[in-house]
Image (tube, rainbow, N blue to C red):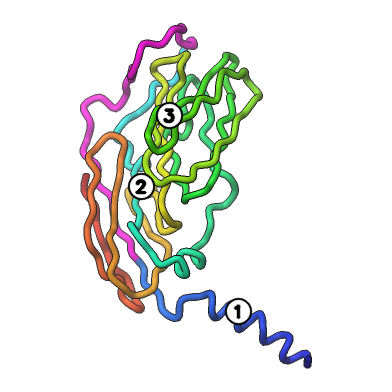
Amino acid sequence: MSTRSTLAIPLLLATLATPVSAGVVRGIVHVPAMVSPETNFNPYAGHATSMPGHMHVKRGLVTDAVLSIASVPAAVDSTLPAPAGRAQQAQRDQSFVPRVVAIPLHASVDFPNEDPIYHNVFSVSPVKRFDLGKYPRGQSRTLRFDRAGVVNVYCDIHSDMAGFIVVLPNRAFTRPGEDGAYRLPELPAGHYVLRWWHPDFPPGEREIDVPADGTTVVDVTF
């Protein structure tokens, strides 16, 4: 095989793996102002005292939103960028940090304990029921998520701890920045369903058309 042919093969494969045309979906996410941005959330009766000066979780943050495309062809999904590294939801200052983690199907999440006390991580969500047991500072547990949906995460020692793992069916999802601006991965031209989710507000969805070249602006209001 000639050198020219050898060099052409990777170029051909890269061309086949990349959509011939792609459009951009972007916009601004708006969330309502909450009267009380902090909470001592108590979903059940815990049985341990709080850490001195532990962090109170802020609710209603625009950065907790997740925007996603309901369905994309498998061939398209394989060309979308994979998340960099493994996702993590730490136990820090008696809180789950970050409060919301978004991952694609079949991804894993690390749950390191960074506090000088024992914590536990469990869920009774139908999407993924689990109990990682109690473990001290410096230890971590890892869990893989093979079913799409929202997984509510708690600590059975501290009742004010609550987090969320949002498992998406594909890689076509994103999170807004602090200014509310978001941008989805580039998608081939077509008709799609854009969905939005937030732990503190009702979810929603909207049908959208992505152009072969250009931008579709979709602002989202919770």
Residue sitting at 55 percent across and 36 percent down? 143
> Residue 153, labelled with which disc?
3
Residue sitting at 39 percent across and 49 percent down? 175
* 155 within the magenta span: no
Q: Is residue 116 left or right of residue 58?
A: right
Q: Quadrant of the N terminus?
A: bottom right
Residue sitting at 34 percent across and 51 percent down? 67
The quadrant in which residue 118 appears is top right
Q: Which of marks 2 and 1 precedes in the sequence?
A: 1
Q: Quadrant of the C terminus?
A: top left
* 36 within the magenta span: yes
In the rendered structure, are the residues bearing label 2 and label 3 in contact, judged by CB atoms less than 8 Å apart?
no
Q: Which of marks 3 and 2 precedes in the sequence?
A: 2
Q: Type of residue at label 2?
A: Val
Could you say which is closer to the camera, residue 54 or residue 1? 1
Q: Type of residue at label 3?
A: Val
Q: Picture coordinates of residue 121 (x, y %)?
A: 50, 25
- 35 vs 166: above or below: above
Could you say which is closer to the camera, residue 58 or residue 125? 125
* Disc 3/disc 1 C-alpha distance (Å): 41 Å
Q: Picture coordinates of residue 98 (x, y %)?
A: 46, 35
Tell me the element at label 1.
helix
Q: Type of residue at label 1?
A: Leu
* Disc 2/disc 3 C-alpha distance (Å): 17 Å
Which residue is tagged 1? 13
Residue sitting at 30 percent across and 44 percent down? 197
Tell me the element at label 3.
strand
Magenta stretch bounds: 25-52
Which residue is tagged 2? 66
